Image: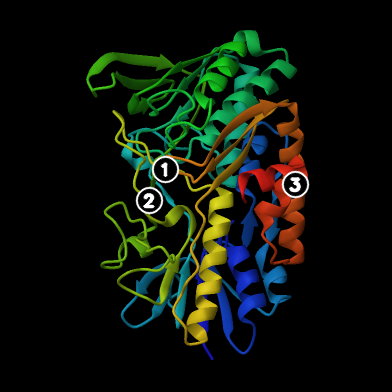
Amino acid sequence: MAHIVILGSGIGGMPAAYEARELIGPPHKITVINATDYFQFVPSNPWVAVGWRKREEIVLPIRPYLERKGIDFIAQPATRIDANHNTITLANGETVDYDFLIITTGPKLAFDEVPGSGPNGGFTQSVCTVDHAEQCYTDFEKLCADPGPVIVGAMPGASCFGPAYEYAMVLDTALRKRKLRSKVPITFVTSEPYIGHLGLDGVGDSKGIMEHEFRQHDIRWITNAKTTRVEDGKMFVDELDRNGQLVKQHELPFKHAMMLPAFKGVDAVAAVEGLCNPRGFVIVDEYQRSPKYPNIYSAGVCIAIPPVRPTPVPTGVPKTGYMIESMVTAIVHNLKEVLDGKEPSHKGSWQALCLADFGDRGAAFAAIPQLPPRDVNWFASGKWVHWAKIGFEKYFLNKMKTGNSEPFYEKALMKMMGFSRLKEKLHL
């Protein structure tokens, strides 16, 4: 009997547990370890940040849903991984042995790389976690009581840009509903070389469409922006040209700021010798397996993917939900093959298919494969995306409750977006 441990229970870890239990089955043991005892649906955090969702609507307790499927759960942070002896040390001092380890921790949020940033001790807000989104909502209400300039965007080294675009547009809509938009100038400050880059060197006409959306909603922007520090009510930004030379230094005042940070690997994972790159992201081969430790697999935001191409201000590559799902499915099938005495053969598709809500409309894109050149390079916008994302949220959370191991993202997106014909066209 093998013991499979899944470290992290987010959008990658929970489906990994369900799929492993169904495909691998007994007598093998599956244990999920997570720093908290709840699952949070991160894509809904921009809505929480303006009061359109409450915490209890997007958070689920983990234990009852996993135990119902015969999966063990431990709610403790991991402090150390001994990859040579296959053990994990927890914050309470206990150790857990494993035969196979799946790392789906997500990232460490590197607010410390820009002095004065972040919601805990800094002056900027975040929508990276539900806790951060709730703090952001408190600050949003302060903004409504005392309107003034707003900054939204992404710090140097950021790789997840979609939530920044979502929050800028959702915030715009929320302020218009309160008849306050005319009192709140919004500036989008991003490390991307152009609007709509998304860490992917653009997708279809993402540049043209997003610039159009920003102009239509009176959102100004600064690209190639290297945020250097933040003070109370003021952000300091170096604007660079395409050669990385300084063009202008900005001192931007704000009453409210939401800036996505760069990501790093979590400490316990990053400390394992030979497992990660210098940023602490897990190095994996085409089968999602560590080249140094063949019994360790990894998926999601915590894996190492090189940038599409160099940019004047460092930008990373996003790991989208659909892409994460394909990684997880590959890992589970590879584990099944290894347990059956075979060599792993499954590979993640690494395709991007995303929905971004803009408050009363939205944008959707398909990048297949995720890194260019692509077979499919599609970006579109409209009111249908707003309603599709609402439906997707409900569909996904329901699947998390039932523990169904079907591919959540693919089924949900295709159902909510009416993509049965497009699915054939895109060869998904």
Circle 1 crowding by C-alpha within 10 Å: few under 14, some 14–19, many from 20: many
Q: Earlier in the sequence, mark 2 or mark 3?
A: 2
Circle 2 crowding by C-alpha within 10 Å: few under 14, some 14–19, many from 20: some
The residue to which callout 1 is attached is 317
Q: Is residue 277 above or below residue 153?
A: below
Residue 10, percent from left and from top: 57, 58
| Kind of residue at disc 3 | Ser
The residue to which callout 3 is attached is 420
What mark, if any, has residue 305 been given in the picture? 2
| Kind of residue at disc 2 | Ile
Whether residues under marks 2 and 3 lie with C-beta atoms below 8 angstroms apart, the answer is no
237 and 161: which one is in front?
Answer: 161
Q: Is residue 184 above or below residue 310?
A: above
Residue at position x 61%, y 64% from top? Answer: 14
Coloring basis for residues: rainbow
283 and 369: which one is in front?
Answer: 369
Residue at position x 52%, y 63% from top? Answer: 8
Q: Earlier in the sequence, mark 1 or mark 3?
A: 1
Whether residues under marks 1 and 2 lie with C-beta atoms below 8 angstroms apart, the answer is yes
| Image quadrant where one finds the N terminus | bottom right
Q: Is residue 197 visible?
A: yes
> Seen in the image, is 362 located left or right of residue 280?
right
75 and 322: which one is in front?
Answer: 322
